[in-house]
Image (tube, rainbow, N blue to C red):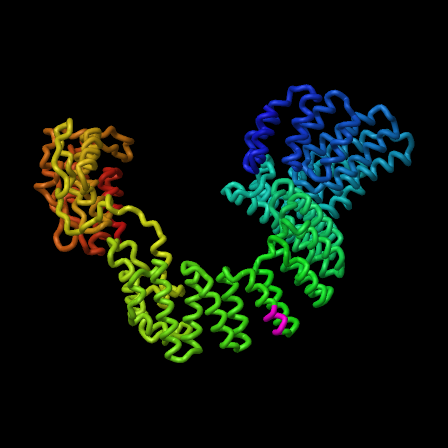
Amino acid sequence: MAESYSKDSTTGAIDKYNVEAAEILANSVLHLPVTQSAPVYEQLLSVFPTAAKYWKQYVEAHMAVNNDDATRQIFSRCLLNCLQVPLWRCYIRFIRKVNEKKGVEGQEETRKAFDFMLSHVGSDIASGPIWLEYITFLKSLPALNTQEESQRMTAVRKAYQKAIVTPTHHVEQLWKDYENFENSVSRQLAKGLLSDYQPKYNSARAVYRERKKYVDEIDWNMLAVPPTGSYKEELQWMAWKRLLAFEKGNPQRIDNALSNKRIIFTYEQCLMYLYHYPDIWYDYAIWHAKSGSVDAAIKVFQRSLKALPDSEMLRYAFAELEESRGAIQAAKNLYESLLADGVNATALAHIQFIRFLRRNEGVEAARKYFLDARKSPNFTYHVYVAYALMAFCLDKDPKVAHNVFEAGLKRFMHEPMYILEYADFLSRLNDDRNIRALFERALSSLPPEESIEVWKRFTQFEQMYGDLDSMLKVEQRRKEALSRTGEEGATALEGSLQDVVSRYSFMDLWPCSSKDLDHLVRQEWLAKNVNKKVDKTAFPNGPGVVSTDRGPSGLPSNSTTSAKVIYPDTSQMAIYDPRQKPGIGISPSTTSSGAASNMSNPMVAMVGSGTMNTFDEILKATPPALVAFLANLPAVEGPTPNVDVVLSICLQSDIPRGQTGKSGTFPAQTPAGPAISASDVSGSTRSHPVPSGSSFKQTRDKQSLKRKDLDRQDEDETTTVQSQPLPRDVFRIRQMRKARGSASSQTGSASYGSALSGDLSGSTG
């Protein structure tokens, strides 16, 4: 199994961090000899170095065979990076076992181990058992004389006083034990000490209750894997962020040293689970720096680069910190680590290093590096643009900047973006002559399909700064060039009003209304698709929507992207038509129970025989009672039915239902009668219009059977209320609701249908 896991882990990061495979592998070696399980644990821990549960299994395997040297070595590798109580309790168990036969010397070593453990995990919310074990250990120490007895009591008292101000699960138990301890020593002294520590204990208990809410949201069995964007990972990230914010708020109002210690402990625990999250490392380091501990921040950054060696963000952040504190050489080393041998260095790394050299070593150092690194394979046009703009803006040397752009033009004439950046630079120099020459040189060498943006910028330049003659000539040349690419087709050669709008617009000012602009954009899109089948769903911007993207003619349009959008196939869609009449579109088909299968509701109108057959099959399996209920549903004049209408029909139908009253729950009564005919089900002989001007007709000739257990007054009232059409007047609806409510309270029992009808009908008021 270990071999298969290592094979999977070599295929990529997903297999390497397969949590399920890791759990299976860890469980499979629990009962193997340590000689066989050790390589598997080493493999697991190389992938999950902060998995405390795997470290615990690993060290317990060595402890089981009394391999003390290997146990110590493993503890030295994991304890400080895995601040988890179960692992540390395993450590103290090992220390006590090793020192139990060493007498006083062994007791002193054990006490030091307890102090070491409590200094690291003593503020954990689950550290209560550790405090209890420590206090029990102190009480068990022998005292040969009065002085040693006094020292032991003092040590126990100090341990209790630290424990009761720590928000843990056992804080209340520790307080009770402390009370008993002080009272057993001296009741008179206990009164003063307990009164002093009572407020501190109360504060710790209150903070514990708040802290527990945040801690309970955290999955303590989670393994540290690179972020995948899953919902569970995001929940855990937010849970840790909330806990960190809670601890930073110092809710217990303790001194800054203790508060910072708890914050550090929380960050360290967080990194056990979010080990591959660069933002957590960055936040931790910056928190140290803002707290005045720059050295601690540097150590955190160093650890972060070991955890995430490929993170450029963390390297830049680390270099920024070093540079800000004046450690220029350390920052330079970080930049050089990004450049490595120069072969795998990114263009961004070159740019940032040139900027760094310019800031700290001067213009000549930056220029020398630029000249030396030009032959690097990843030395793209971005570096030329960045260095030229640096020379122009920072060094105030337009000649050097112009020479850099010209040198880059020999290598990057095929890059439209480089041409545009060069043109922008020349625009700053007001060098319109060289701008036109640059556009002409670029357009003569660029393939037509890659020259679209250059033509667009050339046209805009002439529209802004050229005369009318040059403007019209460039526009015509642009149309001829783009017509050969198929981008706009033959229609590109035709002039249109859109060209006028493009010429005489400025920024967000247009020589027409937004409605006219939208119309022109649509016409432009239609002109390019005149020979294609036009789908109305594929139109560009909706009415009144103006995009900031300019189309081929300079108008704001998304026509370029609209042609690339894949739209759903709507040919099989049954579109709702309010003009449909009940029963249209569905042929009647008799079900097995004798009921017709076509419903009167136009919403279920189907298209095509295949859909009809599917509908018939579904209807054949429908119970007769449900078919009868569906037949009673009203025809709907719109996509959304009137809720009150539907509820009224439901209450007047013969659906089997239970009845609730003071006398209990009665079984449903099934009405007896002939089978439902096809005309009844289809609804062709009846109609249920919505209350748009006519009232409801009585949908059934008979009400359900009279309830024998209810008095005649309730029966008459129920029948009368349900037989009446639903009033449109809100006041009458409320009056009917009150009348039914008072009648129900007088009789002491009411029918379920009547009460429900009143509540639902009255809901519209």
Q: Quadrant of residue 410?
A: bottom right
Which residue is located at x 35 percent, y 66 percent? 480
Please state if 603 lies on the left or on the right of 121 as rendered. Answer: left
- Which residues lie in the magenta part? 398-403
Res. 255 visible in picture: no
Residue 314, horizontal then vertical, whole percent: 65, 51
Q: Is residue 184 above or below residue 576?
A: above
Q: Residue 752's spot in the image, x, y percent? A: 25, 38
Q: Is residue 102 left or right of residue 392?
A: right
Q: Quadrant of residue 527?
A: bottom left
Q: Is residue 225 above or below residue 261?
A: above
Please indicate whether residue 270 sits to the left or right of residue 540 in the image.
Answer: right
Q: Main secondary structure of the magenta part?
A: helix
Quarter of the image that includes the C terminus? bottom left
> Residue shown at 29%/57% (left/top)?
539
Q: Residue furthest bottom?
A: 467
Q: Nearer the viewer, residue 341 or 478?
A: 478
Image-based side of 336 in relation to 109, left or right: left
Q: Position of residue 611 (x, y in %)?
A: 21, 37
Q: Against 471, is 250 above or below? A: above
Which quadrant, please, contains the N terminus?
Answer: top right
Name the spot of residue 375 as percent of width and height, x first. Answer: 63, 56
- Which sits in the foreground, 452 or 268? 452
Q: Is residue 462 visible?
A: yes
Closer-to-camera residue (557/324): 557
343 in the magenta segment: no
Total tally of numbered discs in the picture: 0
